[in-house]
Amino acid sequence: MTDYKNFTVETDADGIALVTWDMPDRSMNVFTEEAMDELERIVDATSADEAVKGVVVTSGKESFSGGADLTMLKRMLGRFEEEKAKDKDAAIKMLFDGAGRMSGLWRKIETCGKPWVSAINGTCMGGAFELSLACHGRVAADSDKVRMALPEVKVGIFPGAGGTQRVPRLANTQEALQMLTTGQTLSPKKAKSMGLIHEIVKPKKLIETAKKMIKDGLKPVQPWDEKGFKLPGGPVYSAAGANLWPPAIAILRRETYGNYPAASAILKCVYEGLLVPFDTALTVEQRYFTEILQTTEAKMMIRSLFVSLQELNKGARRPEGVPQTKFKKIGVLGAGFMGAGIAYVTAKAGIPVVLIDRDVPSAEKGKEHSAGLMDGLIKKGRASAEDKEKLLSLITPTDDYAALDGCDLVIEAVFEDSEIKKSATEKSEAVLKPSAIFASNTSTIPITGLAKNSKRPKNFVGIHFFSPVDRMMLVEIILGKKTGDEALAVAIDYVRAIKKTPIVVNDTRGFYVNRCVLRYMSEAYQMLIEGVPAPMIENAAKMAGMPVGPLALTDETAIDLAQKIMKQTIRDLGEKAVDKDQFELINTMVDRHGRHGRKNGKGFYDYPAKPAKKHLWPGLKDLYRQKEPEDVDVEELKQRFLVTIALEAARVMEEKIVTDPREADVGSILAFGFAPYTGGALSYIDGIGVERFVKLAKHLQKKYGAQFKAPKLLADMAAKGETFYDRFDPYAGKAKEAA
Amino acid sequence: MADAYVYDAVRTPRGSGKKDGSLHEVPAVRLAARTLEAVRDRNGLDTAKVDDIIFGCVDPVGEAGSVIPRAAAFEAGYATEAPGMQISRFCASGLDAINLGAAKIAGGSDEIVIAGGVESMSRVGMGMSGGAWFMDPSVGLPAYFMPQGVSADLIATKYGFSRDDVDAYAVESQKRAAKAWEKGRFKESVIAIKDQNGLTILDRDEHMRPSTDMQSLASLNPSFVMPGEMGGFDAVAVQRYPEIEGVNHVHHAGNSSGIVDGAAAVLLGSKKAGKAMGLKPRARIKAFTNIGSEPAIMLTGPVDVTEKLLKKAKMKLSDIDLFELNEAFASVVLRYMQAFDIDHDNINVNGGAIAMGHPLGATGAMIFGTVLDELERRDLNTALVTLCIGAGMGTATIIERV
C-alpha cells in the first residue's frame, strides 16, 4: 500500500482496511487540502483493491477530528476575493466547486460499493462528523470524551458536506433542525437515540465492533439510496410537516431575529432537500453553501469567533521571553460578589486560593458562593459531590494578610474606594515576595493612579472581570503607565489558566468595555426622551442583535448606579460631560419614582412575583410625549445602537487604549454580546465599509447629536480605503501563514 | 362597457364543520350542485346559455379538487355547454368569483355567469392544499408568517381591543344572527339541503349559539397561546411590530368565525341577457377591487381595500348604507369600525361568521347575498362587502340596487 502523510492503512486477514487518521505536527486532525487528497486516494485504492472487503476509518489521536480547517476556509475566501476582482463569475464558479469538494468526496465514499464504518473514538466535529454520516456504519466509543456536533452555524456557515441532508434523513425532522440550527453538541447516547449512530461500545472494543459490522454483512448502500426510502419525520407535505415547518420558521426568527443567514440557509436546505432525491439535494445544499460563504457574516464570524478567539485564547498578546507562570497560590482580596466569583473560577482551575476579607465570617460567606455554584452544577449533572469538595478545599477564607505569603498573584476586589484599595495594596506587599504580581479588579479607578500605592508599580496591573464572574468569558487586562511585561504575562497566563479570554487594554476611564456599554445605554435614554415607545427601544436593540435590551441592562446594573456614575462624571469632568436631559431622566426615575432597577423590583421594568414575567413600567409612557410607532424608523433605531457602540470602539482604537482589532472585536462580543453576526464592533464598521459607515455616522449626527461624531481616524481610513485589519494589522511582522 | 347585474343569490345552510356536523355526510360537490340547481330552478335558466360557472374553493384537493364547479354542473344536470372554473383568493374566493364574473360580463366576453363558492371543511379539512407561504423558509421567514389567530390577537394588541371588547362583539353577533333567523330574514336565500328522497338534512345554520353571553365566553381559554409561545409566533409578531411588548391573546372559539360546511351561488348577467331571460335585476355591481396588505398582521386588508375602492369609485364612506365585513375574528371587525369610525348599527346587521360560520371559499358569496337581502328589506340603496384574506389581502365590492 502507498504511504500517506496523514493516514495509515492496514488491511487485516479478513480484508478489512483500517484507515487511521493521525496528522503529524497537529494535536488534532483537521481536513486540509492535503488530508482530503489523501483520503480520496485511499477511497480509490481500497475500492480498486479486490482484497479489500470494507473500510474502517478512525483516528490515531485522542479526538477523532475537529472537522475542516477553518483557517483553510479563511484563505479560500481570500482567494475568492482576489479572483472576484478580476472575474466575478469565474470566482463564484471556483467557490461553488470548492464548496462541493468535501461533499463530493463523502458521496464517493457512500457510493463506492464497499462498506465503510466510522469508528468514532473521540470528539468528532463538523466535516468529520459529516464524513461519519456518509459511512454506512457508525460506532462510537462509550466515553465522556466522545462528542459529536455540526457546529458550523456558530461561526456563520453551515454543514455543507451533506450534513443538512443526511441528518434529517436519519433523525426526525424536528430534532435534526434543532441540532443543525444551534450547532448542538451530542453525546453518543443522544446521537444514538436520534438515529445518527448505530452502536456505542467500550473504547477498547471500538475497532473490533466496527470490523464486525462489515463481517456481518453491512450493506454498502445508504437507506436513502434504497428504493422505497421513507423520511423518518414523514414527508414535508403531510399533517406532521404542516405542524412542524411553520413553527420551525417562527422559532428560527425568534432565536436569530433573521440576522444569521447561515441558520436560515439550513432551514432552506432541509426543506428543499427533503422534497427531492439525494443527489439533487446535495446540489441544493452546495448552492446555498456557496451563497453563505460569500456573506459578510460568514467572513466576520469565522475571523472573530474562530480565528481571533483561538489566537487570543492561546495568548496572542503575551510578551515573548517571559517564562510561563505555574500558579502555586493566588490571593483574592475582598470576598464580595466579585471577589467570591474570582475565587471560584480560580479554584475551578485547580489553583489554591486565599480569600481575604475584613473578618473570617465575611470571607467564609464568599466561599459559600462557590458551594452554591457547585450545587447548581451538581443539580444539572455537570459536576459531582467530589468535584465540589475538591474545589472548596482549594479556597482558604481568612482575615489574615499573612496568608498571602507565597502567592504568585494577588487580585484585589475590595470596595471601590481609593483609600481602602491603598491599604489593601500596602498590607499585601508587606507579605508578598518582590516578584509577585498585584492586580486590581477595579472598574472605575484608573490603574496608573492605584499603582502609586505600590512599591512595585511595574508589578501592578488591572485584571477586570465582568459580572457574573463564572459566566462572563472576557477579562480585560489593564496596563498602567508603569506596568511591566512580566505583570502582563502573568495576567495573561492567569486568564488562560481559568479558561477565559484576555484582552489587553491601556489605562483610561471606563477602560474599553464599559465605555461602549455606557454608549449603548445612553442611546436608549435619548430615545426615551425623544418619545420612542419603550418596547420599540428594547425590541430594536434585540433585533439589532444585542442579547439584552439597554433598559433591561440598566435595570440589571441598577439605575441608581447609573445616577452615581453620572454624578461622579460631573464632579470629575464638569457638567457638560453628562447630557442634561439624560441626567434628568435618571434623576426622575430614582429620586421621584424610587425606581432603582431590578434590585428593588422597580426599574424601567416592573418585576412582579414569579411566574409572571417582567414587563415595562407603564409609567414610562407618561414621562415623555409618545411618538406614533408608524413615525419611528425601526431600522434606524437598530443602527443607532450598533453605530454608537462601534464609534466608541473606533475612538478607543484612535486613543490607542486597545491596539489590536481582534481584541476590540472579540471583546465586544464576549463582554456585552455586540451583535455577533457582525464579528464585533470594529468588524461591523469594516463590514459596512469605512466610507459608508462614516456617511451613516454623519447622517445620524445631524439627526441625533454629537455622540455620532466620527473620530478623525475613521475619516483618514475612509480616505485611504483601509479597514481596521489593514490599518492595525495584527499579523504585521509575523508570517501571514501563521494566521 | 356593459354593467353586470345581480339576478339571484342563494346559499346552503351552514353545517357544523366537524364529523358530527349535519352536512358531513354530504360530499362537497353535492353542496355546490344544490346551489346550481336552485339558481336554475328558481329562475327558469336555460343552462346552455351559461357562459361560465366560477366557484371559489380554498382547499381544492381530494373530493373538492379538479375544478369542482365543472363536477357540480354534471351532478346538477347542467347543459354540457356551461363550463366551470375554480379560483382561490383564500377567504374572499366567493366574492372574487363574483367580481371575476362581473368583469367578464363588463368586458363583453360573457353574458351570463354563475359565481359562488363551496367548502366542506368537515370533509376536506383546513390547510390541506399546503403551500410555500407557510412551509417554505425562503417565503415564510421574510413574510413574518403567523397563523391567522395570532394575527387577529396582534390586531387586538396593537389597536387596543381587550378581551371584553372582542367578547362583547361576539355576543352581539350571536344576538343579531338569532334575531335574523327568527324574523325569517334569510328564508328567501337559504335553500334546504335534502337527500335523494326529499328528506331534509339541514335547513338552518347549526353553528349558532344564541344563548351566548359574556359569562359563557369568559370561561373559554384563548386559543392561540400555545402557537404564540411554544410555536414562536409571538416573537414573530413582536419583531414585525416592535412597538408591542408581547401579544395579548384574546381570541377563542367563541369570538372567532366558526368552521362550517356550505356553498353559495349568485346569478350574474348583462342587462341584455336578463331581458332575454325575462328576469328583473336586483342590483348592479358598481365597483370592486383587490389589494395586498401587510401580510404579518394579515387581516387588516379590508381597511386598505375599502380606502382604495372608495377612491376608485369616487365615493365617500357616507355613500355606503350598509357594510358587510366577514367576521373572521372579532378584532378584524372592531379594527375596521375603529379605522373608519363606523357605527355597529351599520355593519354586519344580521350577525356574521362568528355566529353562523365561515365556509372559507363560499363565504364571500354568502355575505354578498345576505347584505343584498337586507338592502331590499330596509329599502336602502348601497352596500359594501369586504373580507380579510390570508397572506394579507383585501377584496371589496360595492353594489347598488336598481
Image: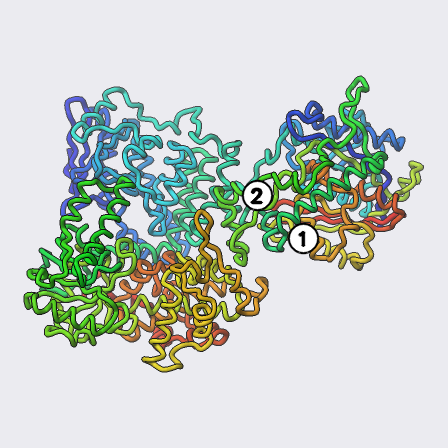
In the image, is residue B23 above or below residue A735?
Answer: above
* Amino acid type of the residue that numbered disc 1 sits on in the rendered structure: Arg
Where residue A623 appears, x then y in whole percent? 53, 68
Q: On residue B335, which mark appears? A: 1
Count up the numbered dots. 2
Secondary structure of the residue carrying numbered label 2: loop
Would residue B65 be visible to someone looking at this image? Answer: no
Side of B162 relative to A620 (left or right): right
Secondary structure of the residue carrying numbered label 1: helix
Task: Identify the residue shown where x is 28% and y is 36%.
Answer: A187
Side of A493 relative to A163 (left or right): left
Q: Which residue is mark 2?
A: B147
> Which mark lies nearer to you, 2 or 1?
1
Q: Quadrant of residue A195?
A: top left
Q: Quadrant of residue B258?
A: top right
Where residue A307 appears, x then y in whole percent? 26, 55
Where residue A514 appears, x then y in whole percent? 32, 67
Q: Are marks 2 and 1 on the same chain?
A: yes
* Chain for numbered disc 1: B
Q: Nearer the viewer, residue B200 or A93?
A: B200
Quadrant location of the N terminus of chain A?
A: top left
